[in-house]
């Protein structure tokens, strides 16, 4: 039960919440705020997504930094600026770990 802070009378229920019958004092209903939980943005290498169908890409004998497997798929990706060198990507065929090599 809530009381009007001015008149100390019981507040009555109104459409917009609680209202004092004697003065114009009104209290809005407590609105439960639903917290918007921002889902963590998955950090992913752009090239990784652009190469979803990369299974046909050539493989190379290179040691995976993560699991030590000795074969990885590789592909080249030209960065936006033509001045920048092409980036070479490797993806372990075993654990799918992806890393890049700045040639
Ligand atoms: Zn009042
Ligand atoms: Zn691996």
Image: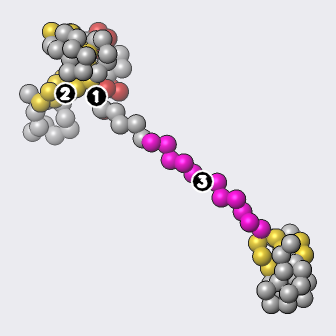
Question: Can you give x and y, in whole percent of width and height, for residue 99 in the image?
Answer: 22, 26
From the viewer's perspective, is residue 75 above or below residue 35?
Answer: above
Gap in angstroms between the C-alphas marked 3 and 1:
34 Å
- Give the position of the N terminus as an image quadrant: bottom right
Residue at disc 2, secondary structure: strand
Question: Can you give x and y, in whole percent of width and height, for residue 97 in the image?
Answer: 29, 21
Q: Which residue is mark 1?
A: 47
Seen at 30% across and 11% down, the residue is 94
For marks 3 and 2, the one nearer the N-term is 3
Q: Which mark is residue 35?
A: 3
**Residue 74, visible in the rendered structure:** no
Select label 3 or label 1 by which is in front.
Answer: 3
Which of 76/26 is in front?
26
**Residue 7, visible in the rendered structure:** yes
- Give the position of the C terminus as an image quadrant: top left
Magenta-drawn segment: 29-40
Seen at 35% across and 16% down, the residue is 53
Question: Can you give x and y, in whole percent of width and height, for residue 33 in the image?
Answer: 65, 58
From the viewer's perspective, is residue 82 above or below residue 10?
Answer: above
Select label 2 or label 1 by which is in front.
Answer: 2
Residue 8 falls in image quadrant: bottom right
Gap in angstroms between the C-alphas marked 3 and 2:
38 Å
Q: Which residue is mark 2?
A: 100
């Amino acid at each position: 039960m809530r009381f009007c802070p001015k008149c100390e009378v019981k507040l009555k229920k109104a459409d917009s919440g609680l209202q004092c019958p004697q003065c114009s004092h009104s209290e809005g209903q407590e609105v439960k705020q639903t917290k918007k939980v921002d889902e963590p943005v998955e950090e992913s290498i752009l090239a990784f997504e652009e190469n979803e169908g990369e299974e046909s890409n050539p493989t190379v004998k290179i040691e995976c930094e993560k699991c030590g497997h000795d074969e990885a798929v590789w592909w080249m990706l030209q960065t936006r600026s033509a001045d920048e060198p092409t980036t070479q990507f490797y993806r372990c065929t075993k654990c799918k770990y992806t890393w890049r090599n700045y040639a």
